[in-house]
């Protein structure tokens, strides 16, 4: 196993609330989120000065710790104000988003469309049948046309280079809705979910058990910046890309977190707070299905896997899920955070779009990270 310096302790935070921002009572909201009511003054000034307006969001590699925390803060703030506070916030009124989908989706499409509309904006959905990106029209021309017709683009594509080409030519922000290399909007939802559940992120240990894919790559670009230790178990030949691994090793060393690579799922799960997996057969890999199912034998997450994890362990999966990846006993248990995780796709994409398009300042106290 490849390791870096590590302190495998995560001290749980006390469960208490400060007065609600909506009134002067403790937990004044019926569904008050304890996490987002805790006030942590340390770092509030630095996060408050972060401005992401006009930026693109292709990979979390491009964002530092304060910028990622700011996005999580804005996302949690919008969730608190809109879902729990029942406020209407037309922050994107008069704005439109072009959603380019080369690959089908449930959560990415629904979270973006409903989230943008909830904020007063107009989403425009384009499939590969509507727009043949780079085929009938060059990426360069498409980027320039969309820059004059809408305010932001979210593209869910096969090739990450397509996003880079769009971003190079566009004069508006480009969001990576998924590519073969990264899936950053999923990871924002994952970390918001963990922040809400555990009360803080720093010191948590996340164990990835499965394929070294785009979701894992985004975890690797983010975890160390948030003080999160990462253990990775993949079958031989299915590990993360070398360039991503090298950058993750650098980040781990810089931030003093642990990064472990192994082919043993139980080793990865040992003393972990969070067990994570994903599909073993991604879109475009259907011809490899039989071989992959054989190679991933023994990687299913079960209660036995969790038996060596930390007593407070939880489970994440970005969905859709197949039973060979995680059994029903774990997936539908109280340890599973997959459905809050799926809902948080909406709040984090809303937080991202608001941050890239406006100078919005969160109204809720800064959470503890």
Image (cartoon, rainbow, N blue to C red):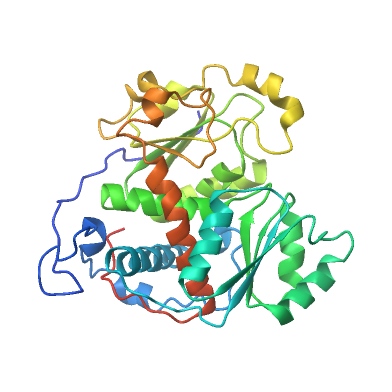
Q: Is residue 47 left or right of residue 169?
A: left
Q: How many marks?
A: 0
Residue 48, above or below 4 = below
Q: Is residue 235 left or right of residue 164?
A: left
Q: Residue at x 78, y 60 (%)?
A: 130
Q: Is residue 226 left or right of residue 110?
A: left
Q: Residue at x 85, y 60 (%)?
A: 134
- Outermost residue toward the left in this view: 25
Residue 44 visible in rendering:
yes
Q: Residue at x 67, y 51 (%)?
A: 179
Residue 257 visible in rendering:
no
Image location of residue 310, percent across then percent down: 29, 31
Decide which of 364, 342 is in the foreground and name it: 342
Image location of residue 190, percent across then percent down: 43, 49
Residue 338, above or below 287 = below
Image location of residue 278, percent across then percent down: 54, 35
Split into 4 quadrants, where in the image is the C terminus?
bottom left
Q: Quarter of the image holding residue 49?
A: bottom left
Q: Residue at x 58, y 56 (%)?
A: 109
Image location of residue 362, percent across then percent down: 35, 75
Decide which of 362, 208 is in the foreground and name it: 362
């Amino acid at each position: 196993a490849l390791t870096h310096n590590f302190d495998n302790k995560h001290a749980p935070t006390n469960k208490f609330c400060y007065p609600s921002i909506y009134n002067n009572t403790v937990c004044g909201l019926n569904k008050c989120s304890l996490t987002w009511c805790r006030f942590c003054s340390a770092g509030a000034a630095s996060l408050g000065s972060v401005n992401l307006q006009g930026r693109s969001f292709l990979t979390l590699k491009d964002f530092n710790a304060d910028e990622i925390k700011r996005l999580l803060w804005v996302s949690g703030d919008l969730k608190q104000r809109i879902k729990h506070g029942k406020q209407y916030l037309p922050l994107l009124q008069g704005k439109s988003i072009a959603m380019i989908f080369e690959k089908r989706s449930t959560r990415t499409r629904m979270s973006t469309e409903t989230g943008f509309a909830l904020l007063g904006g107009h989403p425009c959905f384009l499939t590969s049948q509507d727009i043949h990106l780079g085929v009938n029209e060059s990426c360069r021309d498409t980027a320039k046309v969309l820059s004059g017709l809408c305010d932001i683009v979210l593209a869910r594509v096969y090739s990450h280079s397509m996003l880079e080409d769009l971003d190079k030519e566009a004069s508006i922000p480009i969001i990576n809705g998924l590519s073969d290399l990264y899936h950053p909007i999923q990871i924002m939802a994952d970390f918001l979910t963990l922040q809400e559940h555990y009360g803080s992120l720093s010191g948590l240990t996340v164990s990835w058990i499965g394929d070294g894919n785009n979701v894992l790559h985004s975890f690797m670009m983010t975890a160390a910046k948030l003080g999160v230790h990462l253990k990775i178990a993949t079958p031989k030949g299915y590990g993360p890309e070398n360039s991503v691994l090298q950058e993750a090793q650098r980040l781990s060393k810089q931030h003093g977190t642990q990064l472990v690579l192994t082919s043993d799922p139980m080793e990865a799960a040992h003393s972990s707070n969070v067990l994570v997996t994903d599909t073993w057969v991604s879109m475009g890999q259907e011809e490899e299905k039989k071989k992959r199912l054989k190679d991933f034998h023994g990687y299913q997450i079960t209660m036995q896997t969790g038996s060596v994890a930390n007593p407070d362990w939880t489970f994440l999966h970005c969905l859709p899920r197949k039973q060979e990846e995680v059994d029903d006993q774990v997936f539908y248990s109280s340890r599973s955070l997959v459905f809050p995780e799926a809902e948080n796709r909406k709040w984090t994409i809303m937080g991202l779009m608001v941050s890239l398009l406006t100078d919005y300042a969160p109204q809720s106290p800064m959470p503890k990270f």
